[in-house]
Image (spheres, helix red, strand yellow):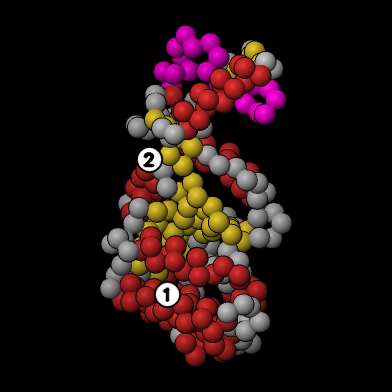
C-alpha cells in the first residue's frame, strides 16, 4: 500500500510524485512478478515532514520492520502476537484502499478475456487516444486480410477471428466518427516497413504482411493522417519506448508491453488521480509536438514509395 496526493506534488527534481512512483514500479512488472498495489489518499509531503517517526512498514510471515522515511532507522519485530496485530492492522487498512493497477497476460488461450476487457472499457468512452511507437495497424485488418495473415494453429481460431473482426471494424468506425486519435512515430514504423510485423499483438497470432499488404495498410494510414486522426510525433516525443503502448479509453488507461521473458502483458491504470494525469496529458497534446496532417500524409507516402521500389 502507498499513499497518493489529491493535488499534484513534485519531487526536488521537479518530477511529479505519481509518475515517479509509476516509473520506479514498472520494472517489477517487466519481470512479471506478482506485485499487487493498493493506494490511499493523503498529503505525502506533510506526512514525511511530521513527527511520525516510523511511517513505513515491511511485513512478512515471520518478521516485521517499521522504519523511518529515509530507511535509516527501524525496529524489527518477531513476536507472533505482535506480528498478528500488525497483519490485522494491514488488512484493516487495505480494506479502505483501492487497487492502483490491474495486470493480465495476452495469451492465445484467453483472447476472449482481452476482447471483453476492451469492449467493457469502451462502453462509456467518448474518445479513444493511443500513443505508441508505430501506427495502429489493427483498424485496417479487413476480414480478407485478417484471414490471410491469421495463425490458425492457435486455440479457437475461428471464434477469435470473428471477435477480432468485430473489434477492428469498431476501431475503423471510431476513426470515421472522429473518436479515435493515434499518436505514433516515423521511427516506430521501421519494423512494419522492413518485416511486415506490428507490435500491438504477439507475433504468434499472425504471419508477417507481404509488401503488397503493407502498402495497402499504408495507403489507409495516409488517408487517416490526411483526416487528422493519425498524428506523427516530432521531437522530443519522436522516440517513444519501443516496448510500451498506451491507450486512453474512458476511465481506463491501459499499457501493453513485453516482459523480459517475452510474455505480452496488459497493464491497466485504474487509480483515478494517476488516470487523470494521463488524461490531461493526452487530451491536451500541444500541436507543436506532431506534424500537420499534410506533412504526416507525405511522410507515409514516402514510406509507400520506398516499399514500391523494392
Q: Which residue is mark 2?
A: 273
Please name whichever residue, 309 or 83, is drawn nearer the observer in this view of the structure: 83
* N-term-proximal mark, 1 vs 2: 1
CB of mark 1 within 8 Å of CB of mark 2?
no
For label 2, count other residues whose C-alpha is less than 10 Å away and answer few (under 14), some (14-19) or many (20+): some
Residue sitting at x 58%, y 38%: 24
In the image, is residue 55 part of the stretch drawn in magenta?
Answer: yes
Residue 238 seen in the figure: no
Q: Position of residue 20 (x, y in %)?
A: 51, 36
**Which stretch is magenta?**
45-64
Q: Position of residue 171 (x, y in %)?
A: 39, 73
Tell me the quarter of the image containing the C terminus: bottom right
Q: Is residue 128 left or right of residue 204?
A: left
Check residue 167 in the rendering and tell me which mark sits there, or answer none: 1
In this rendering, the answer to whether 209 lies above or below 27 is: below
Q: At 58% across and 79% down in the image, what residue appears?
A: 156
**Residue 272: percent from the left, percent from the top?**
37, 43
Asked whether 111 or 300 is in front, the reply is 111
- Label 1 to label 2: alpha-carbon separation: 29 Å
Give the image quarter of residue 276. Answer: top left
Q: Position of residue 29 (x, y in %)?
A: 61, 48
Q: Residue at x 61, y 71 (%)?
A: 108
User: In the picture shown, does residue 211 fall above or below 194?
Assistant: below
Magenta segment includes 174: no
User: Tag on residue 159?
Assistant: none
As drawn, the residue found furthest toward the top would be: 51
Whether residue 225 sits left or right of residue 145 in the image: it is: left
Amino acid at each position: 500500500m502507498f499513499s497518493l496526493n489529491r493535488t499534484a506534488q513534485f519531487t526536488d527534481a521537479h518530477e511529479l510524485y505519481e509518475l515517479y512512483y509509476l516509473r520506479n514500479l514498472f520494472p517489477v512488472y517487466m519481470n512479471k512478478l506478482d506485485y499487487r498495489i493498493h493506494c490511499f489518499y493523503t498529503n505525502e509531503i506533510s506526512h514525511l515532514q511530521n513527527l511520525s517517526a516510523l511511517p513505513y512498514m515491511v511485513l512478512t510471515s515471520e518478521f516485521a520492520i517499521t522504519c523511518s522515511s529515509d530507511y535509516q532507522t527501524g525496529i524489527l519485530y518477531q513476536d507472533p502476537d505482535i506480528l498478528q496485530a500488525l497483519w490485522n492492522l494491514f488488512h484493516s487498512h487495505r480494506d479502505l484502499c483501492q487497487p492502483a493497477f490491474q495486470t493480465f497476460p495476452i495469451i492465445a488461450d484467453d483472447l476472449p478475456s482481452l476482447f471483453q476487457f476492451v469492449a467493457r472499457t469502451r462502453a462509456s468512452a467518448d474518445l479513444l487516444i493511443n500513443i505508441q511507437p508505430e501506427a495502429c495497424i489493427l483498424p485496417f485488418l479487413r476480414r480478407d486480410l485478417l484471414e490471410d495473415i491469421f495463425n490458425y494453429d492457435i486455440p479457437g481460431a475461428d471464434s477469435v477471428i470473428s471477435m477480432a473482426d468485430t473489434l477492428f471494424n469498431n476501431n475503423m468506425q471510431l476513426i470515421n466518427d472522429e473518436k479515435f486519435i493515434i499518436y505514433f512515430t516515423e521511427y516506430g514504423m521501421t519494423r512494419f516497413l522492413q518485416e511486415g510485423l506490428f507490435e500491438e499483438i504477439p507475433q504468434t497470432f499472425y504471419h508477417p504482411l507481404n509488401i503488397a499488404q503493407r502498402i495497402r495498410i499504408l495507403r489507409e494510414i495516409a488517408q487517416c493522417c490526411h483526416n487528422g486522426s493519425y498524428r506523427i510525433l516530432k521531437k522530443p516525443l519522436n522516440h517513444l519506448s519501443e516496448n510500451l503502448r498506451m491507450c486512453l479509453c474512458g476511465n481506463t488507461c491501459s499499457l501493453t508491453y513485453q516482459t523480459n521473458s517475452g510474455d505480452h502483458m496488459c497493464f491497466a491504470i485504474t487509480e483515478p488521480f494517476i488516470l487523470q494525469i494521463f488524461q490531461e496529458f493526452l487530451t491536451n497534446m500541444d500541436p507543436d509536438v506532431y506534424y500537420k496532417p499534410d506533412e504526416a500524409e507525405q511522410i507515409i507516402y514516402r514510406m509507400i514509395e520506398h516499399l514500391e521500389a523494392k
